[in-house]
Image (cartoon, helix red, strand yellow):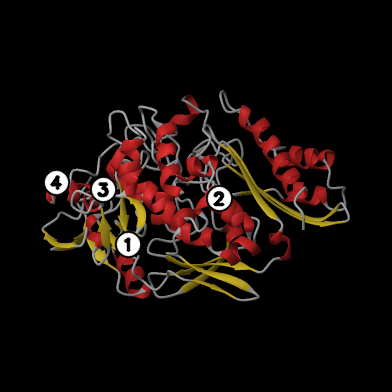
Amino acid sequence: MRPFTYVEGISVADAAAAVHAAPAAMFLAGGTAIVDLMKLGVLAPAALVDVQRLPLGDIELDDRRARIGACVRNAQLAEHPEIRARWPVVREALLSGMSAQLRNMSTVAGNILQRTRCPYYRDPHSACNKRVPGSGCAVQTGWDRDAAVLGGSPHCLAVFPSDLATALAILDAIVYTRRGDGGARRLPFDGFHRLPGDTPERDTVLDHGELVTHLELPDLAIARRSHYFKVRDRASYDFALASAAVALDLERGHVRDARIALGGVATRPWRCTAAEQSLRGKRAELASFRAAADLALADAVARTHNGFKIELARHVVVRALSELAARPG
Amino acid sequence: MVRLSVNGERHELDLDPRTTLLDALRDHLGLTGTKKGCDHGQCGACTVHVDGRRVLSCLALAVAQQGREIGTIEGLARGDHLHPMQLAFIECDALQCGFCTPGQIMSAIAMLAEVEHRRQLDDVAIRERMSGNLCRCGAYPNILAAIRRVRT
C-alpha cells in the first residue's frame, strides 16, 4: 500500500473542501472497498479524509420520504422496521449482498459508489480503461464470463455490482451532495451512474471533492409491494450473476403499474421502462412476466462466455415478478 | 499517536496510517488470536467486535477506530472460565485446523446478539448469517451444532 496521510473530517464543508483541494485525495467511510483496493494497488490516494464522524449517520422518516445519511451502515438500513415495511426491496437487496461483517462496516453512500468487481480492474497489471484511462480493456480479448451484456462500450464492459443501487433504481431515489466549492446538488438517481462510453473511469456524475451527504426515498405506494431476487455462483455472500428489483401495483389480478431494474448484467443500475410499460393493464401471470422479461433483455449483447447471463436474467425477472405477485397484500 | 481501547485496556501506539486494525492487534499489541486469512475481507478469519458489532479487522484502518471499544477473542474468557461459545466449539468439535475458529466464535457471538428471537433461528438462517466466515476444513456441520447449542 502506498503511504497516505489520514485526516479526520471536521464538518461536511471542510471534508469536501479538503478533498477538492487535493487532486489525489479521497473520502474514507466504511473503508471496505477502498482499503481492499489500496492493498491491491488499484487505488493509491495521497490523502484519506475520514467522513465517518460527520453527522451523516441518521435515518429520518416522515410520511413523505426517508432521508438516509450517507454514513448510515448498510446493516442499519436493512434492520430499520419502517424501511422494511415501506421499501422492502431495499432490505432484501442489502441482505442479499456482502457478509454481516461487511454490512456492519460499509455505508450506504459507499455502497452506491463501489467500483466494479471486474477482475481486470482489480489487477493493476492488466489493461483497464476504468483504472488507467487509455490503457485498453482486457475483457475485449480476455475472460468475459463476468462481463456486462447491457450498457457496454468498446472501452469497458465492467458490471456495476451494487445490489442497493439496483433497488434504488426503481424507487425514484435522490442523491444529495456537497461540493468542494461549497455548492450543493440534488441528483436524481436515474442519471447518477454513467454509461462507460469512452470515459469509463467515471462511474458517476460526481465531481472530485463532491461528497454524498444523503439519499432520499420519496414515499411511493408501489414500493410497498417490492422485491429483490438475486442469483449468485454460491448460495450466499457473493455478487450477482443476475438480479432484479421489482415492484407491482396490482388490482384484481391485473397490473396497474410495475417497476423493474436489473443488476449484475449491466454497466450501471439498469431500469427497464419498456418492460414496465408492457405490463400495464396485463394480467399478473406468467405469460405477461415472460413477455416483460424478453423486453428487458431485448438489447442484450452476448460475448464468448457471458451469453448465459441473458437467459438467466430473463428467468430472474420472471421469478422476481412471480414471487411478488403471489405475495398477500 | 493512535489511541485504541482493546478488551477494556487502553493503548497508545505509534502507527503508520496504513496499519489495519488486524495488524495493530497482531503485530503491535501481540494479540495474535485474531487471524489473517485472505486480508481482503473475503474469509472472516479476522472478525473482531467494534462497539459490540462484528467487523473485519483486515479492512479497518487502526487510525479510524479511535474512541471505539474493540473486542477480540482474547477478551472472551474470564480467567479459566471460557465463554459459552468457546465451550460449545470445544464440546461440538467445531474445528479441525482451528485457523478460522477465533473469527467463527467472534462472529457467532455477535450474530446471536443481532437476533431478537433466537429460538426462531433455524439452520438455514444460521448458515446465511454466518456466511461471511469460511472454513476451508469444512467443519461447518459442527460449527452449526455449536452455535445451535448456545442459541437455546
Disc 2 marks which residue?
Answer: B120
* Pointers 1 and 2 in contact (C-beta within 8 Å): no
Q: Which secondary structure lies at badge 1?
A: loop
Disc 3 marks which residue?
Answer: B82
Please tell me which of labels 1 and 4 falls first in the chain.
4
Q: Separation of disc 1 and disc 2 at Cα?
A: 25 Å
Q: Could you tell me which chain the residue with mark 3 belongs to?
A: B
Q: Which secondary structure lies at badge 4?
A: helix
Looking at the rendered structure, the kind of residue marked 3 is Leu
Q: Could you tell me which chain the residue with mark 4 belongs to?
A: B
Please tell me which of labels 1 and 3 falls first in the chain.
1
Instruction: Using the rendered image, report if marks 1 and 2 lie on a common chain.
Output: yes
Q: Could you tell me which chain the residue with mark 2 belongs to?
A: B
Residue A13: name its quadrant.
bottom left
In the figure, is residue A216 to the left or right of B98?
right
Please tell me which of labels 2 and 3 falls first in the chain.
3
In the figure, is residue A9 to the left or right of A311?
left
Looking at the rendered structure, the kind of residue marked 2 is Gln
Residue A73: name its quadrant.
bottom left
Q: Separation of disc 4 and disc 2 at Cα?
A: 40 Å
Looking at the rendered structure, the kind of residue marked 1 is Asp
- Residue drawn where x is 53% and y is 33% of the image: A147
Name the mark nearer the viewer: 1 or 3.
3
